[in-house]
Amino acid sequence: MPHISFLVDNIDKTYETLSEMGVTFTAPPMSCDNSTFEGAKTAYCYDPDGIFVELFQIPVDTEKFY
């Protein structure tokens, strides 16, 4: 699905803050455990215009990620 993605430092905090502001997410943040992005976390929501938005947090061990 086409979407825009934003890197965030702390996806759990960002999720909590945006949820408190009324943003509806498709699900809470999830770990990417069985993919190329192992160790990363992601969450999806829609912006006010209906555009699908991904929040993406790279793993703490960025050496492994890159």
Image: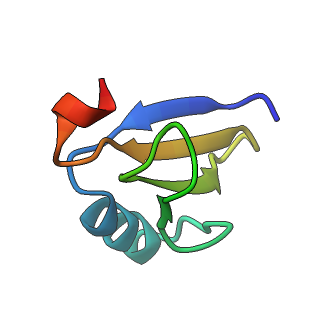
| Quadrant, the N terminus | top right
User: Looking at the image, what colour scheme do you see?
Assistant: rainbow
Is 58 or 49 nearer to us in this picture?
Answer: 58
In the rendered image, which quarter is residue 53 located in?
A: top right
Q: Is residue 61 left or right of residue 16?
A: left
Image coordinates for residue 21, horizontal then vertical, percent? 42, 69
The image position of residue 62, as x and y in percent, is 20, 35
Residue 29 % position (x, y): 47, 67
**Left or right, 47 with reference to 30:** right
Which residue occupies the extreme right position in the image?
1
Q: Quadrant of the C terminus?
A: top left
Q: Is residue 6 above or below residue 40?
A: above
Q: How many marks?
A: 0
Residue 9 in picture, x, y percent from top left: 21, 46
Residue at the spot 60% in from the left edge and 29% down from the top edge: 4
Foreground residue, 65 or 18? Answer: 65
Quadrant of the rendered structure where residue 54 is?
top right
55 on left or right of 9: right
Question: In the rendered view, does 51 fall on the left or right side of 43?
Answer: right
| Identity of the residue furthest to the top in this view | 66
Residue 65 sits in which quadrant?
A: top left
Comparing 27 with 18, the one in front is 27
Q: Residue at x 23, y 56 (%)?
A: 10
Residue shown at the point (40%, 64%) measured from the top left:
18
